[in-house]
Image: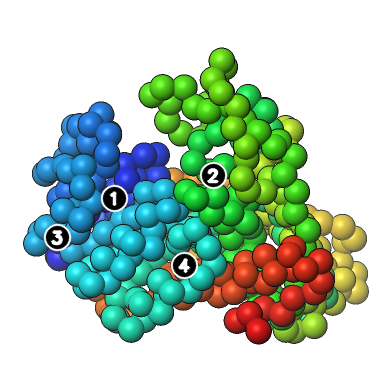
Amino acid sequence: MRTLGLAVVGMGWMGELHTRALLRLPHHYPEVQARVRPVVVADPRDDRRQAAADQYGFARSTAEWRDALGDPGVDIVSITAPNAMHAEVIAAAVDAAKPFWVEKPVGRSPQDAIDAAAAARHGGIMSAVGFDYEVAPAVMRARQLIDDGTVGPIRTYRGHFLADYAADPGVARSWRFVRGEAGSGVLGDLMTHVIDQALLLCGPIDAVVADQATFVTERPEPAAGMAGHFGTAEGTQMAPVENEDHIGALVRFASGARGTLEVGRTVVGRNVQMGFELYGDRAALGWTFQRMNELEVASSAKGAERGFTVTYARDGYGDFSRFQPGPGIPMGYDDLKVIEASRFVRSVLSGQPLRPNIETMAEVAEVMGAIERSVSTGKWAKVGPAT
């Protein structure tokens, strides 16, 4: 049994989630033969550092993230700090030869992510990126049905991520709404997941044409001591929103399939509706995160019942049986992070990269760059380096 010392950079909700997922590994993946030991947490807030020590047993804490990466007891790094820090922390992790697990969008721009992938590749550093929706068992079953020919050639694809966390104009102007800190708005926050799932299920995207809008153009500054992205503020000064609330795109896949991708953070009532529909010449599939353990399937086979039927995640659907004994007993979002953690640790121990990793993010970033170019010109943009 190998013990891996963990450093976490940024101990908000996602930092806690990474920590819990890594600590749960022996329960769900005993054959991995690895345990994670919380060594050091880096966060500027005293209360978060103290909570990390009390709740998760971190041996020490620091306000300086470079100090955490330099600790000789650290073997792996979770990077769950704001977007503006991603590139710098990844560069330092690569220099220190520390494998890292980072949340998307890996920086403030598509180029940040592409550069980070190149650095990790050059340094031979194993990585993971937080594309948790692609490891949902029902989604993995969809991938299996595509691979075994059940769906047939895919004709059309619809991907979406509609959220309401910014629907209220009183939601405070956290760093997510500031270009210098977050970079893009929903392009990096939500569209990354939609692009990743489209690439996973349908393969490379050749070209896009896209449009975007900012519907809430100013928001109140956060009140003193406010943290997170969902709190409302009253009586504070208004400030401009610097990035987009909504993006819609048409896409052409290399296979010849066509698709639409849509994301928005001001969609009243939708909470977290992320999912896809895809239509092949033999079958169609549908999935939504709000019903994470269900896969909709329709067949065009002669004699098949018309319309969609629902199948529940079960043994044989990805890693479902690692968490639940049978269909109808649902997994939760935190479990997806445990699957991610298992892939990350397996890659660290074996030296063999497993997706979703920094190369996955670079592929997504190429599509993000094309969306940005299309928004700028109002024309179709090829996916790949700008010419």
Residue 156 rendering spot, x and y as whole percentages? 82, 70
Q: Residue at horizontal 37%, vertical 49%?
A: 81
**Residue pointed to by mark 4:** 112
Looking at marks 1 and 3 on the same chain, the residue that comes earlier in the sequence is marked by: 1
Q: Residue at horizontal 73%, vertical 65%?
A: 376
Looking at marks 1 and 2 on the same chain, the residue that comes earlier in the sequence is marked by: 1
CA distance separating discs 4 and 1? 18 Å
Please identify the quarter of the rendering in which residue 125 is found: bottom left
CA distance separating discs 1 and 3? 12 Å
Looking at marks 3 and 2 on the same chain, the residue that comes earlier in the sequence is marked by: 3
Which of pointers 2 and 4 indicates the residue nearer the eye?
2
**Residue pointed to by mark 2:** 178
Q: Look at label 4 and name its amino acid.
A: Asp
Nearer the observer, 237 or 122: 237
Q: Look at label 1 and name its amino acid.
A: Val
Q: Look at label 3 and name its amino acid.
A: Gly
CA distance separating discs 3 and 2? 30 Å
Q: Is residue 316 above or below residue 380?
A: above
**Residue pointed to by mark 1:** 9
